[in-house]
Image (cartoon, rainbow, N blue to C red):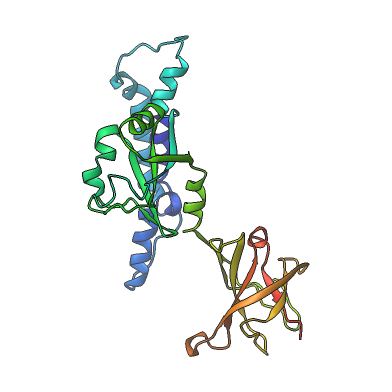
Amino acid sequence: MPLAYSTLLGGLMTLIGTPPNLLISESLSLNGYDPFELFDFTPIGGGVMAIGVIFVALFGRFMLPKKAAEHGKHVSQRSLRARYKLHEHTYMIRVPTDSILVGKTLAESRIGASTGLIILSMVRDGRSETLPGRQTVIRGGDGLLVQGRVDQFRELRRWSDLVIEREAPVLKSMVAAKVAYAEVCSGQDVLQGPGTVLDHGYLLIDESLPEDRASVMMPYEYRPLPVEGDVVTALDRAGHKLGDAKVIAVRQTKKMDQTATVTIEVPRDWSMRARAIRLKR
């Protein structure tokens, strides 16, 4: 609590102490007024901070609840698991084609209402739908990513014909399949040389490709441009060769001036290392 108050009070001291100060200064500048300087807030903010520190030190501590600390109290593992929900697991549940739940909505199935389980996602035909609605109709072969306690899964197994397949490392792969990474560079050329991409704009990395593959999109300013299907040499930030990469997309529009974007396909473990390409022709 004292640390939180110190942070709030200290934020009044300078322009960069708190985001609202920066927003107000920027608004003044955009409307033709002089923006605040770094220490323009200090005369008023310093006074408020001093008053706040004195209040917290002399009076605020008497306003705290008078509750004796429970020193040395033993906390059981069971209570810790319950408090932090460490006993909850995530499983993939498969709906058999002949299940009585086929054709019913999730609300009608009462999977969540009867057991207290939480349906995180539905997997159908290789696609996942996060937090499906209550009116989503269940089909045979659907996979349900469900979170809950072990005893809740036992209850589900007792009254339903659903197949509990495995605890879900699948959750990581399903989330990762929807994640892309972007890197914005500072504007300083990192690599130079004939046929080498300039790493000074942005990179977009997609790790959702199958078979442990990833794509890396980067700006390219040299000519000639590679074409889709070309095999090029992937380089790391220092210009060291990683290996062959396939060009899967080349894009250039009038708005992009002379800068094109080239997307290459690489092994997934190269995705955070591949930062440039060199043409082979």
The foreground one among 262 and 146 is 146
Residue 163 horizontal/vertical position (percent):
41, 40
Residue at 34% x, 60% y is 24
> In which quadrant of the rendered view does residue 23 lie?
bottom left
Residue 204 horizontal/vertical position (percent):
55, 68
Residue ranking furthest to the front: 98
> In which quadrant of the rendered view does residue 125 lie?
bottom left
Q: Quadrant of the C terminus?
A: bottom right
Q: Quadrant of the N terminus?
A: top left
* Left or right: where 55 falls relative to 73: left
Q: Is residue 185 visible?
A: no
Residue at 34% x, 39% y is 161
Residue 269 horizontal/vertical position (percent):
66, 58
Residue at 53% x, 88% y is 257
> In which quadrant of the rendered view does residue 245 lie?
bottom right
Image vertical order of residue 59 relative to residue 90, above or below: above
